Image (tube, rainbow, N blue to C red):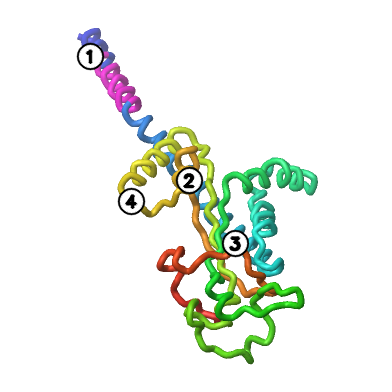
Amino acid sequence: MRRRAGQSTSRGSGRITGSIMLETVIALPVVLVLGLSITQWALIHQARAMTDHATLMAARAGALNHAQIAPMRNAFARAIVPMHLSTASATGFETAFLTRAMPDARINLQLNILNPTREAFSDHALRDHRGRRYLPFRNLERASTRPGRQSHINVQDATLLRVQAVYGYELKVPYAGAFILQAVRMATRWTKAFGARERVMIASGRLPIVTTATVRMQTRAFSGRQFPLRSDLPGVAREPLNSD
């Protein structure tokens, strides 16, 4: 009788062990995918915050450099160096900026000026001694607040530099990154919210992060091709700006 009881206990424990192993085999992939997904979304949130800060730095650089794209791209690249930094030192920072952040910003970043528009130059621009058209940035409190006929904004709003950054963020977490990208690729088939550059980023395995920043111009903005036509902007960008 004792021998049978021992055998019964042994068989029962074997069944329990087998059940635990089966549950582990089923649950482990689910837990693994969930953990990887949480990690990837946390990294995306961090990248979003860093891109938002980098866009502000780019806009500030543009405000101090006549709304030129090159200084803005340089400032954006310097702000995203922590994404590429491997050594916490001044030398490591500069190395990461030159070898990784700057090439990344050159290839995977699109900077768009949403304001001022070319119509704003037609309405409010002055000319310097060389005949170049520019938007004034001094003594705006004394200027007229009447909206222009073509731009539909006054000179105070015309001297607000609004910059949009579209940055292609690389998803590095295994499985989770590929799953998110596949979901985004499927979404591009059903919506027109993604532009051509954003679709290229998605196709190349990067997630587009779109941020905007608005600052007051601190230098003259000279008329150029970097400024858009009002008709080419999305509806949100055409809304009057708040110059307060």
Q: In the rendered image of this protein, does residue 226 appear above or below residue 36?
A: below
Question: Which residue is disc 4 drawn over?
Answer: 191
Asked if the residue at tag 4 contacts the one at tag 1, i.e. Cβ–Cβ closer than 8 Å, the answer is no
Q: How many other residues sit within 10 Å of disc 4, few (<14), some (14-19) or many (≥20)?
A: few
- Asked whether 149 or 183 is in front, the reply is 149
SS assignment at label 2: strand
Q: Which amino acid does label 3 sit on?
A: Gln
Indicate the position of residue 42 as horizontal and vertical percent values: 49, 48
Judge depth for marks 1 and 3 and give the one in front. Answer: 3
Q: Which segment did they paint magenta?
A: 11-25
Q: Residue 207 carries which label?
A: 2
Under circle 1, the secondary element is helix
- Say which mark, if any, is on residue 8: 1
Q: Residues within 10 Å of mark 2 (few under 14, many from 20)?
A: many
Task: Please indicate whether residue 47 sits to the left or right of residue 178 in the image.
Answer: right
Estimate the spatial distance between the alpha carbons at disc 1 and disc 4, rounded to whole Å: 62 Å
Gap between marks 2 and 1 measured at Cα: 57 Å
226 shown above or below 188: below
